[in-house]
Amino acid sequence: MDSLTFYVAKDGSDRWSGKSPSPNVERRDGPFMTLARARDAIREVKAKDGSQQPVTVLVRGGKYFMEETLLLDPRDSGTRECSITYKAYPGEKPVLSGGQELSGWRPYRGQIMQSALPSAKGGKWKFRQLFFNGQRQRRARWPKFDDENPLYGGWLQMEGPAKLISFPGSWRGDRVQKSGSGVAFKFAPGALRHHWSKPEQGEVMYFAYEDGWVSTVPVKSVDYTSRIITLTHGGYQFDVPPWYEPVSFRPGYRFRVENMLEDLDQPGEWCLDWDEGIVYFWPPSGSITDGDEVVVPALDCLVDLYGASWITISGFTFTETMDGDNFHRDGVEGVGAMFPRAGWRYCGEAVHLKHAEHCVIENNHFSAVGGNGVYLEGHNLRNTIRCNEISEAGANGVCLAGTALQQPLFNRVSDNYIHHCGVLSKNVAGVFTGASNGNTIAHNHIEHIPHHGINLANTPLGRNIVEYNLINHVGLETHDNGAINCWMEQPGQPDAQRCGHIIRYNYISDVHRYDELGKSASHRGIYLDNYTSNCLVYGNVIVRCPEGIMVHGGKNNLIENNVIVDCPIGVHLGNYVCTWEYWKPMASFLSANHILRNVIYQSDPSAFVFALHGGTGIEVAQSVAQSDWNLFFQGQQGKYTFRDTTELADAEKITSLSGWRALGFDENSVIADPLFVDAEHGDYRLGPDSPALKLGFVGVDLSKIGPRRHRTAM
């Protein structure tokens, strides 16, 4: 079958034919200059004779500042036999930027330069990023960035709410805070070094609710006498009844103030005066020369596949897209608290798919985009997101979210390297799903994420497969995390559908957050939160997490054939929220879970093999259907500890293996060294003489875990 090729190049022209990779000698013909013109040329070929043929658009290297989103709709679709491909010219690297270059720089004060941006005047264009020669710069802030402690240094602490007000009743019952303020807080004497001339130009980033939620909110006013900062609106603090109760600012909440001109005092810092439309910048090199490039984000989406099919996007670098607030697209379900709010701005994504089928996004680099990397919204069928690198994204790496009726179905997210995301928004994940079904998230390497590695979110509507992923160093900045997390709290009725997920053959390590309080204990390797049920958790290796696996209130979960190493709590069963008003019908839902043929290895003799916790007590015999044929090794052979913090009488609590066995559990389990191949150097394969094999444990092939194109050592 004949195929057709078009070319796009920086030195091209949209008046030319686009049929050669370089301009001819006379410069009368050659490549196109824009992707949009190449798209239109394909449409023209289709309209001319109605025939279908494979078409490839080869894009030469260089940086393309996109003035508008490349929209590919049904007119631009290929077929199974005649696909449409947009890809990098062999050996070259095209860069698609959503930014706008700033020019006309002139001195302001000292080393600080200024550039007029009239289109931003009056607050018409606000952004939180600036790039110098392709590198994201730091917005002016107080306190200053702490190079020695970049994650947990450089923060102030609130003294508490600025005033007392009454909140309405809450579905959470007696746990609601009855007074306080969610829009104004007090700061300590001497905390601020300046009386800012334009405080309304600033924004406060703060961690709330035990560092569980992070918001960045504009400043309304600063009262230096009363030491009060008032914000324009509240942030994420579980503050929208009936799902997220109103809570006040509390003493100790971490915060910093950004975008104040008086705080711009170091190389690489910048700020925007959005009233006057002026950008201030201290170049890291001390000056801005003719060869330097200063860019601010303008476009919130670079490529939009809307109703398109059989299209491949390959080999591009996507960068410098717009930023925004921490929530998901309007109209999707299952994303928990990250829903749209009036007056907030969605952060966008570099590549958007909706009603797309059989499309492929592969071998691209999403570098410092302002929002999400790739977002599959609503109905999307059998698309593939593979072999991409997503680094320093402002929000999530890849998202799949739909509704009960319009879901991403049977898509595949595989072999991607997703790292250092959540730069601007913190309640994010390497891969985030909402309402979706039948998708496979496999062979990805995900690391250095502030929140979850993979978040299957608050949806009981579908079953997704999470397998062969390498996840490490996640949960670094927020509270209540999991390398792989999901919850099924909505609706809070015992008879609601809860499909469950398949979570197997993942290698998880070092899920924790270190700060002045030490290592957080609310981070899990695999976290089946709030009534997650019917999941298969099989063949995972979980290393150095505060908790290995937690089942929080769910039922019919099978936890089998996992290796849990040096987690202070191996397996945790609990039901923390059953006393809250909304979830009272779920008080006895925790039931019928199976814990079979797992290896729980702990070097620390003070660790716990199992932990039980319940707000009103747990009926253990109901919570666990089976626990048997497990292997335990704790500190030294013969050691075994059990933590029971349920609200039961002390005489009824379980404190030992014998007490656990008295209930009929782990009668065939053993306490023995699992005989790992080389535990000292992180090789947790079982040796041929391991007693776990005699219990029916099946060894996990670690060589298959992680991206298959370039294996990462574990």
Image (cartoon, rainbow, N blue to C red):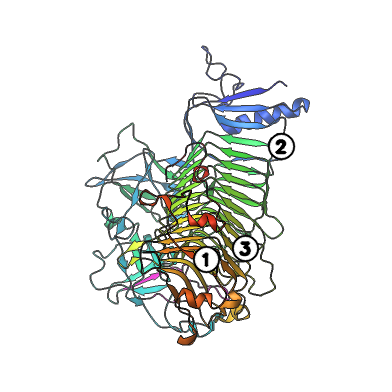
Q: Residue at the location (61% across, 24% down)?
A: 6
* Residue 127, percent from left and from top: 43, 52
Q: CA distance from mark 2 to mark 3?
A: 34 Å
Q: Residue at the location (58% across, 32% down)?
A: 35
Kind of residue indicated by mark 1: Ser
Badge 2 or badge 3: first in the primary sequence: 2
Q: Magenta span covers which residues?
A: 228-250
Does the residue at mark 2 contact the one at mark 3 (Cβ under 8 Å)?
no
Q: Nearer the viewer, residue 671 or 146?
A: 671
Answer yes or no: is residue 491 visible. yes
Look at mark 3 in the image and give the residue it sits on. 459
Q: Is residue 139 magenta?
A: no
Q: In what element is the residue under mark 3?
A: loop
Q: In what element is the residue under mark 1?
A: loop
Q: Which mark is residue 669?
A: 1
* Residue 529, percent from left and from top: 54, 67
Kind of residue indicated by mark 3: Thr
Q: Which mark is residue 75?
A: 2
- Give the label, 1 or 3, closer to the camera: 1
Kind of residue indicated by mark 2: Arg
